[in-house]
Image (spheres, rainbow, N blue to C red):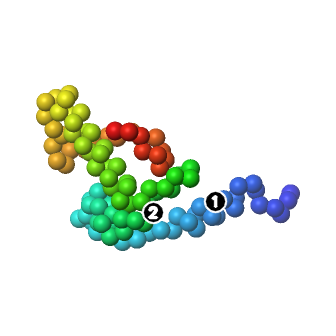
Amino acid sequence: MSDEPSPGTGNIHVTDEWNHTEAPFPRDLRLAEAFRRQAALTPGNLAVMSSGRQLTYEQLDAYSDRIAAAILRKSREATGAEVEAGTPVGVCLERGASPPPV
C-alpha cells in the first residue's frame, strides 16, 4: 500500500478550506435586498467570474432588473396581469457570467 494520498484528495482539502466563508446574515433581510445593498456599496467590484468573463455588481444588478422586467412583461402577455410582489418565480439559466438576452 502506498503512503501517497489518493488522487483528488488534495482538491477536497482546498475546497473545504475555501468554503469556510460563514458570515452573520440578518434573518429579516431577504437575499435580493442584501444583494441590492452590496451593489449600492460596491458597484464596481467583481460579483461573478466565469470562463474569463466578469460582471461587476452594477452589471449584475442591471441584468437582474432586465430579468425582472421580462418576467413582468411575459406575465402580462400570458395572463393579462402582473406577477404579484412576493410571489416566487422560478428562473432557469445556464451557469456562467454571460447573461443571455432577455
Given the image, on which type of amino acid does mark 2 rest?
Answer: Leu
Residue toward you, 85 or 72: 72
Residue 52 in the image: state x and y as whole percent.
56, 53
* Residue at point 20%, 44% (across, down): 87
Disc 1 designates what residue? Answer: 12
Given the image, on which type of amino acid does mark 1 rest?
Answer: Ile
From the viewer's perspective, tell me whether residue 84 is left or right of residue 65: left
Q: Which mark is residue 42?
A: none
From the viewer's perspective, tell me whether residue 19 is left or right of residue 69: right
**Outermost left residue:** 81
Residue 34 visible, this angle = no
Residue 101 visible, this angle = yes
Quarter of image, res 42: bottom left
Q: Residues within 10 Å of mark 2 (few under 14, many from 20)?
A: some
Quarter of image, res 24: bottom left
How far is the residue under mark 1 from the one under mark 2? Answer: 26 Å
Residue 40 in the image: state x and y as whole percent.
30, 66
* Residue at point 59%, 61% (across, down): 15
| Total count of labels | 2
- Dot 1: what SS? helix
- Dot 2: what SS? strand
Quarter of image, res 47: bottom left
First in sequence, mark 1 or 2: give its number: 1
- Which corner quadrant holds the C terminus? top left
Q: 81 above or below 15?
A: above
Disc 2 designates what residue? Answer: 46
Residue 49 in the image: state x and y as whole percent.
50, 56
Residue toward you, 20 or 56: 56
1 vs 2, front mark: 2
* Residue at point 83%, 63% (across, down): 3
Residue 69 in the image: state x and y as whole percent.
24, 43
* Residue at point 32%, 70% (across, down): 41
